[in-house]
């Protein structure tokens, strides 16, 4: 007897997303085998059918029963969510088929969880991607960790299935730690729970933030790559229609410039113009855009990737030298770079922009905390121009109105809002700004005190001093932190001369 076995995919759970071919297979079947939840999704087409409902964990029994019924000469549909061939029952059925079976087997494709969840997040799988199930019921956990390591290193977008259950609470965090070891914590990720079903919920966050969240078996995770972009509530993976200039491969034995400042980017352009292989490392996506604009010949590395990953990159690429052109207040990264270069025996040079001369009417502060206290004693509508990472030092006191100017990046804006600044008190623009621009903004906002830091002429400090003096507004300037650099210079020519003097194999 020649029975028919339909392996039917019904997608994420919405009737509207069940393929017409799946509905046709169900309607022409005499018998339906499936899990109760899946059967509810196809309830309108079950009238008059013989129904066999088996619970979760009895997948082998479901497949065996469907085969038994088909072998008796009847037409049966084995129903699965998503796509039955992706972490579904189709492989099990083919594994159980006998060489002597004379069955008409048809696999009806559907919308798998990776695709349904991706559609709710935007288009995060627009380029190459992979999927990985975290369930160790059928796959040894060491295999899962090994595959996660390879995927994390591959820079593919990755969709994680079967993320967390009551019996498997910690596994997902071990996997996310693997990704954090190989990818920047700033890359974009998404979570989707109950895609196209009741209780649907989506969220977009960084990989670092994802590590702090809780999940369950109804949640699917999408981990992005260095290419993944965010636009509003959506994520997308560029296809390369506009080229991949921002993602040049890291050349071996290159000069690494750690920057994020205008003068550092100009230095990178000078090095590239001298024919040196250069890599520019910046902390943010916005910084990467600026670095590419100034030095399109350089390879760009972006993200706060951490000391271990940074050490591995410098070691694997056999970096020729490190030039630390980070902001004068970025002491943590400078200390880290000095330690890495000492460990790997890589020549290190600090490129430090000159300090500014401060007139007598400027109020000097030794720290952000001291600056906040001075500012509160001087004014009520206080303008902060120190960068987003220090905003909480000021805004934690609510007895004053705080205003800020920040760089025009999504991350900067989110941090400013998280610090408690109203949107109407935020100016997101790229500096530096002229005296006239400062005066205009401060007059419009009725600012009566300004806080900035000694960012030098490149950072626009002289224009702020002049504007505050013209408006008779108190100006508080945070002094640079002291750090003992093994070697440093304040001129581009000196950096170029130092690099040219290095041994060829350094």
Image (cartoon, rainbow, N blue to C red):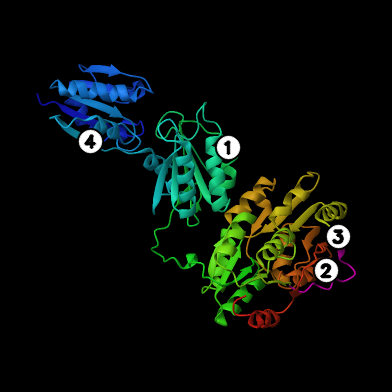
Q: Earlier in the sequence, mark 3 or mark 2?
A: 3
Instruction: Estimate how packed mark 4 is, as few (under 14), some (14 to 19) or many (20 or more) residues with alpha carbons within 10 Å.
Output: some
Magenta highlight on residue 44: no
Location of the N terminus by quadrant is top left
Instruction: Estimate how packed mark 3 is, as few (under 14), some (14 to 19) or many (20 or more) residues with alpha carbons within 10 Å.
Output: many
Instruction: Estimate how packed mark 1 is, as few (under 14), some (14 to 19) or many (20 or more) residues with alpha carbons within 10 Å.
Output: few
Drawn side of residue 197 relative to residue 374, left or right: left
Location of the C terminus by quadrant is bottom right
Do residues under tags 4 and 1 come within 8 Å of each other at their CB atoms? no
Drawn side of residue 11 relative to residue 66, left or right: right
Q: Which residues are the magenta region?
A: 353-363
Do residues under tags 2 and 4 come within 8 Å of each other at their CB atoms? no
Q: Nearer the viewer, mark 1 or mark 3?
A: 1
- Distance Cα–Cα, label 4 vs label 1: 37 Å
> Which residue does the numbered mark 1 point to in the structure image?
213
- Give the secondary structure at mark 3: strand
> Which residue does the numbered mark 4 point to in the structure image?
107
Q: Earlier in the sequence, mark 1 or mark 2?
A: 1
- Give the secondary structure at mark 1: loop
Between 15 and 298, the one nearer to me in the picture: 298
- Distance Cα–Cα, label 1 vs label 2: 48 Å
Quarter of the image for residue 437 reads bottom right
Image coordinates for residue 99, horizontal then vertical, percent: 16, 32
Drawn side of residue 62 relative to residue 257, left or right: left
Query: Given the current orientation, which residue lies at the most extreme right position?
Result: 360
Quarter of the image for residue 38 reads top left
> Which residue does the numbered mark 3 point to in the structure image?
365
């Amino acid at each position: 007897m020649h029975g028919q076995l339909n392996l039917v995919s019904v997608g994420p759970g919405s009737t509207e997303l069940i393929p017409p071919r799946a509905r046709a297979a169900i309607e022409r079947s005499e018998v339906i085998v499936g899990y109760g939840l899946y059967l509810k999704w196809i309830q309108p087409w079950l009238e008059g059918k013989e129904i066999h409902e088996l619970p979760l964990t009895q997948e082998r029994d479901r497949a065996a029963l469907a085969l038994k019924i088909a072998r008796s000469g009847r037409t049966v549909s084995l129903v699965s969510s998503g796509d039955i061939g992706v972490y579904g029952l189709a492989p099990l059925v083919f594994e159980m088929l006998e060489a002597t079976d004379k069955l008409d087997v048809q696999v009806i494709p559907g919308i798998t969880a990776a695709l349904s969840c991706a559609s709710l997040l935007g288009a995060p799988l627009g380029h190459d991607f992979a999927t990985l199930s975290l369930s160790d019921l059928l796959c040894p956990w060491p295999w899962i960790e090994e595959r996660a390591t390879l995927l994390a290193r591959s820079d593919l977008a990755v969709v994680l299935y079967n993320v967390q259950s009551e019996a498997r609470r910690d596994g997902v965090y071990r996997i996310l730690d693997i990704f954090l070891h190989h990818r920047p914590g700033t890359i974009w990720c998404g979570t989707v729970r109950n895609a196209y079903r009741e209780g649907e919920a989506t969220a977009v966050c960084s990989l670092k933030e994802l590590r702090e969240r809780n999940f369950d078996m109804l949640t699917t995770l999408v981990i992005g790559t260095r290419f993944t972009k965010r636009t509003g509530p959506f994520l997308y993976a560029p296809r390369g229609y506009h080229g991949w200039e921002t993602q040049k491969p890291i050349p071996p034995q290159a000069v690494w410039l750690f920057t994020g400042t205008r003068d550092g980017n100009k230095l990178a352009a000078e090095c590239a113009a001298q024919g040196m292989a250069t890599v520019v490392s910046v902390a943010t996506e916005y910084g990467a855009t600026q670095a590419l604009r100034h030095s399109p010949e350089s390879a760009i590395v972006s993200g706060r990737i951490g000391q271990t990953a940074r050490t591995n990159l410098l070691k694997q690429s056999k970096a020729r030298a490190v030039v630390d052109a980070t902001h004068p207040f970025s002491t943590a990264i400078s200390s880290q770079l000095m330690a890495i270069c000492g460990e790997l025996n890589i020549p290190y040079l600090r490129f430090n922009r000159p300090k500014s001369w401060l007139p007598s009417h400027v109020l000097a502060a030794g720290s952000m905390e001291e600056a906040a206290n001075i500012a509160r004693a001087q004014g009520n509508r206080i303008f902060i121009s120190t960068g987003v990472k220090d905003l909480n030092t000021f805004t934690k006191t609510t007895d004053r109105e705080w205003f800020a100017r920040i760089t025009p990046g999504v991350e900067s804006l989110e941090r400013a809002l998280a610090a408690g600044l109203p949107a109407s008190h935020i100016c997101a623009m790229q500096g530096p700004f002229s005296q006239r621009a400062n005066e205009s903004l401060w007059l419009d906002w009725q600012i009566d005190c300004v806080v900035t830091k000694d960012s030098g002429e490149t950072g626009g400090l002289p224009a702020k001093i002049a504007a505050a003096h013209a408006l008779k507004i108190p100006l508080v300037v945070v002094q640079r932190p002291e750090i003992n650099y093994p070697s440093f210079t304040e001129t581009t020519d000196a950096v170029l001369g130092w690099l040219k003097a290095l041994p060829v194999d350094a």
